[in-house]
Amino acid sequence: MERKVGTVSRGLRAPIIKDGDDLAQIVIDTVMGAAEAGEFTVQDKDIVAVTESILARAQANYATTDQLAADVKEKLGGETIGVIFPILSRNRFGICLRGIAKGAKKVVLMLSYPSDEVGNHLLDIELLDDAGINPYTDVLTQERFEELFGQSKHTFTGMDYVNYYKSLIEEEGAEAEVIFSNNCKTILDYTKNVLTCDIHTRARTKKLLKAAGAEVVLGMDDLLTASVDGSGYNDKYGILGSNKATENSIKLFPINCQEFVDGVQAKLKVLTGKTVEVMIYGDGAFKDPVGKIWELADPVVSPGYTAGLEGTPNEVKLKYLADNEFAHLKGDELKVAISEYIKNKDEDLGDSMVAQGTTPRKLTDLIGSLCDLTSGSGDKGTPIIYIQGYFDNYTK
């Protein structure tokens, strides 16, 4: 019988993961337990995806704000530092700001406006138009900002991030000054020691600041790249991708991801005889149409994945074929013609018109977004995702 279902994404319920747990074995037991319960049959090219959060937790990859402060003080001098372009997030950045402020005497906090890098808005851009403010050139003090626009309220949470961040700095004993600018070089009028907190544009920002005469320029990926006083660390991403753990600690992005995914794949091969792809995923890469928030606050969607997930899809657009090459066909004739076309398609369609509309995003970005939407970030209790049929097409 012809199969009637294509891609299926399942959230697998798992135990609550704690420090030191053997996560690889837990993942394997969870997958095999679901298979034995009749939920699915393991097949080649199935995908097991695991949230970065539980891997970091199992690795006990944590750091306290005091440990972060020690690194900040050592690397940025402990006096006045510029902290520029952070995202507006209590979970992602607020706890980091506590540690940063502990490592300085004064923090000049420079916020981009009208929104941060991932789309969290301080205000509606039309209010800038009404006030005659040019966000590409104008620098605003906090006083001028609030005189023009009042106190900012986040679209979803109602949080006033400007004053929240300012209060965090002051609570940690540092002086705080808040300014608004989209030009990274503005901060050099206040200090030559800069921590740039943007995520995906950080390399360019560092380059521009260094060329403009900054004395010390670091990104969040330069902090806690090695253990400080026994802390966790991430040698590649630093504190990028971190999340709040407690009121005085952060959970860092996981390490040794490649070793983990390769190990899980090998063990599943032994148990099932099938080659299952495995990946670690964090934030998906998609944009909310209401709040305009681009979800990707992690440095990458997937910090580790097996070799079969490398590359981009090589797909034809079915509706293009139906409306063009095979516009004269219907029903079974159309189905047969399209199936044959797919079976004989080029291994690399490149910029072929038949592939138009199949945006060539990385497989790991696409699959990671699917996983993030499946697992959510709340109380579903499904940090392991099992995907089947992702690599199938109309002919399978």
Image (cartoon, grey):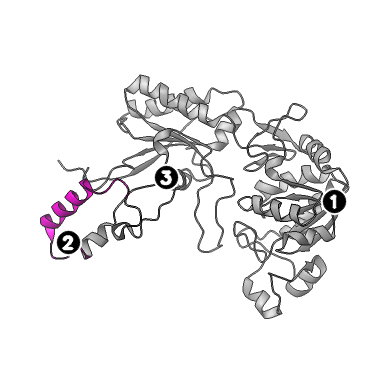
Bounds of the magenta segment = 324-348
Q: Which residue is mark 2?
A: 326
- Point out residue 229 in the picture as x, y percentages from the top left corner: 78, 28
Please report whichever mark, 1 or 2, sits nearer to the chain's N-terminal start. 1
Q: Which residue is mark 3?
A: 363
- What amino acid type is highlighted by mark number 3? Leu
Label 1 to label 3, Cα distance in Å?
44 Å
Whether 373 is among the magenta residues is no
Residue at 11 percent of width and 56 percent of height: 333
The relative height of residue 175 versus residue 71 in the rendered view (above or below) is: below
**Disc 3, SS:** helix
Dot 1 or dot 3: first in sequence order is: 1
Nearer the camera: disc 1 or disc 2: 2
Residue wearing tag 1: 170
Neighbourhood count class around disc 1 (C-alpha, 10 Å): few under 14, some 14–19, many 20 upward:
some
How many angstroms separate mark 1 from mark 2 (CA)?
Answer: 68 Å
- Amino acid under label 2? Phe
